[in-house]
Image (cartoon, rainbow, N blue to C red):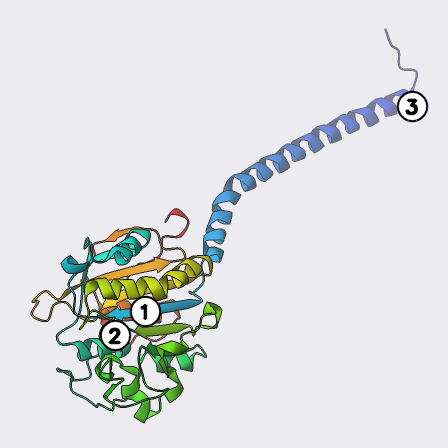
Amino acid sequence: MTMFTGNSDLGVVMQCSKLVRLAQGLLWLGGLAAAASAAAAATKPATTAAAQRARSWSPPAHVVVVIEENKSFATIVGSADAPYINELAKQGLLFTDAHAVMHPSEPNYVALFSGSNQGLTDDSCPHDLSGPNLASELLAKRLSFAIYSENLPAVGYAGCSGSGGLYRRKHNPVVDWQAAGLPAALNQPFRNFPQDYSKLPTLAFVIPNMMDDMHDGTIAEGDAWLGAHMSKYVRWAKRHNSLLIITWDESDARSLTNQIPLIVVGAHVKPGRDGNYVTHYSVLRTLTDLYGLKPLAEAAQTAGIKIYRLNGQ
């Protein structure tokens, strides 16, 4: 049996007891810290995933909108005469209930550019219009815009027809605002479409000529033109946070439903089909929403189209 010989032995015992209690306390605190760390680790992936989703998207560096002519959804989708367009429909997002806003052509171009047909009901020319539009809103936010029309005779050309009728002003809404101050330099021939796609404006409209847009030419000719002039851009866009949108101004001229093809392909676009009812105003609202612009006229009364499916969303 161990005997205590005095107060010194008792002091030693008491000090040892304190050390034991201190060690137990430290172990308890360590357990709390470990539990807190584990809890934080359990919640961290969700927070990180949300942050990654937020960081993984930014407005497209470039959007190119190609406007074709006078063909219905049923005429194009599934057509053996349009192999390239149908391949793009498989690569991107195909809208199966898209519609023009009216007949004939010109009011649809103006509506897609400004959110209103501006009172136009025919293809008459010329018209000098004023008020907010897609280009003016982009420029006000220090972003850029241009329209590239095939066979436009010269930069800023304001005539109603050119190049033997291959170019028609009725398919170029931008020139209608030049007299109101929209810079003529935005109105470019397609031959000036940059081959270095990083030099494209933020947003560009592309207008093939009267043959290549399927108005006077065939579906096969229009499809071949798109393959020749847009396929390289599509491949580039997928790697450089950019988009291609292909739409038609209107359906067959006598169509009551005015249903048209609408295809979006590019970075972050998950292939598939979207059956929501959309119009040119929906497309315009999407373009203004992408860049934080004020919605324009009737486009403010509609929702934009959902073109992105980010990180499994």
The part of the image, by quadrant, that contains residue 211 is: bottom left
Q: Disc 3 marks which residue?
A: 8
Q: Position of residue 267 (x, y in %)?
A: 41, 57
Q: Position of residue 217 (x, y in %)?
A: 19, 70
Q: Mark number for residue 274?
A: none
User: Distance between the Cα atoms at labels 3 and 2?
Assistant: 96 Å
Label 1 residue SS: strand
Left or right position of 253 against 185: left
Q: Nearer the viewer, mark 1 or mark 2?
A: 1
Label 2 residue SS: helix
Residue type marked 2 = Leu
Quarter holding the N terminus is top right
Residue type marked 1 = Val
Residue type marked 3 = Ser
Cβ atoms at labels 1 and 2 below 8 Å apart = yes
The part of the image, by quadrant, that contains residue 33 is: top right
